[in-house]
Amino acid sequence: MCHRHLLTALCAWLLLALHVLAAPPYKALIVDGQNGHDWKSTTPVLKKIVEDTGLFTVDVATSPPRGKDMSNFRPKFADYHVVISNYQGDEWPEETKKALVDYVKGGGGLVIYHFACAAFPKWPEYNEMIGLGGWGGRTEKAGPYVRWRDGKFVLEQVPGPTGGHGPMQAFKIEVRNFDHPITKGLPPAFMHVEDELYGWLRGPAKNLTVLATAFAPKAKGGSDEHEPILFTVDYGKGRVFFNALGHTAKELKSVAFIVTFQRGVEWAATGQVTQKVPDDFPTAEKASVRP
């Protein structure tokens, strides 16, 4: 009887140990609840994309609906290695804002997905964290455009729109920084499916590194510039990654989005990327999608 109990206890301990060893090492939090885009359909896909790396468990913090009391919306950012924003809406409580700033400054990771760059136009620290933003009443006072000219990036402080895009279109993404962990090993250029091609983003652009651009032709409603599509920002001890791709859940099937998002989330959380470039990564001529 004693041996049987000992064996049972040993088996339970082994199962617990195997569970701990098999558990993903990092924790991610997606913040949503309000957005000019369909967050209800994109958040579950983003959650699966991040979990598919095998590196993360993912929780979701959903705010009250637009116009409702936000005073008790206080996600525990500090419990996570990375926070992913799929949020664009009402102002957060000051305590929540301070918690996010302190979290990133202290070394936390932040990922800005698509239209989250339009959030909080009047929050200075947020605009510094995200580097470049658009819409929300932003003007040239928000900061300069970042332009690719003669093989380098320059800041252009001129009047003009802040945020915009033409009709849905397929476009080629060109890597501009081959040494960064997020883009290291990616091909120099690769195609993305029909999507919103963000342009005219502007902001403080402090400690900003552009990883990749896409040309937005004037004939298709664009700026006729190579627009920043993937970039990072160093904020305090923290790491911020912005991915402009992914208007709806349909566009999130693009391997160009999936892989750059997964790599960006890992980098924001850890400062490195351990994931290999998959065999189905798109080429410069053809986009690829997953079911």
Image: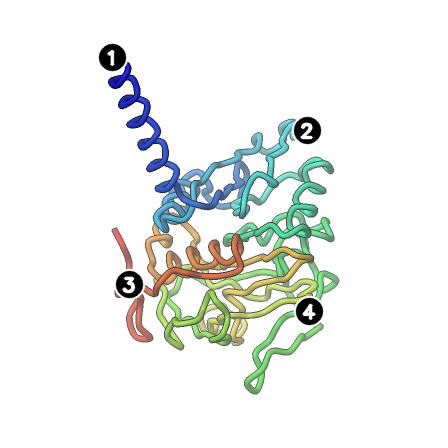
Cα gap from disc 4 to disc 1, whole angstroms? 76 Å
Question: Disc 1 marks which amino acid?
Answer: Met
Q: Name the residue under label 3.
A: 288
Q: Mark 4 near mark 1, Cβ–Cβ under 8 Å?
A: no
Could you tell which of marks 4 and 1 lies nearer the N-terminus? 1
Describe residue 67's horizontal placement relative to residue 220 as left or right: right
Instruction: Provide the residue designation for mark 4.
Output: 144
Query: Judging from the image, what secondary structure is the residue with disc 2 in?
Result: loop
Q: At which x and y percent is residue 32?
A: 52, 39
Q: Mark 1 points at which residue?
A: 1
Residue 84 location (% of width, % of height): 52, 47
Residue 71 got which mark? 2
Q: Do the residues labelled 4 and 3 touch (CB within 8 Å)?
A: no
Could you tell me the amino acid type at mark 2? Ser
Q: Which of marks 2 and 4 is nearer the N terminus?
A: 2
Looking at the rendered structure, the secondary structure element under dot 3 is loop
What secondary structure is found at the residue carrying circle 1?
A: loop
Q: SS class of the residue under badge 4?
A: loop
The residue nearer to you, when weighing 191 against 279, is 279
Residue 6's place in the image compared with 176, above or below, is above
Q: Distance between the residues labelled 2 and 4?
A: 34 Å
Rendered location of residue 195, percent (x, y): 40, 59
> Which residue shows up at 37% across the image and 62% down it?
256
Precedes in sequence: disc 1 or disc 2? 1
Spatial CA distance of label 4 from label 3 is 34 Å
Q: Residue at x 61, y 55 (%)?
A: 135
Q: Distance between the residues labelled 3 and 1?
A: 60 Å
| Residue type pointed to by label 3 | Ser
Instruction: Give the left or right position of residue 100, taking residue 246 as reference.
Output: right
Outermost residue on the top side: it is 1
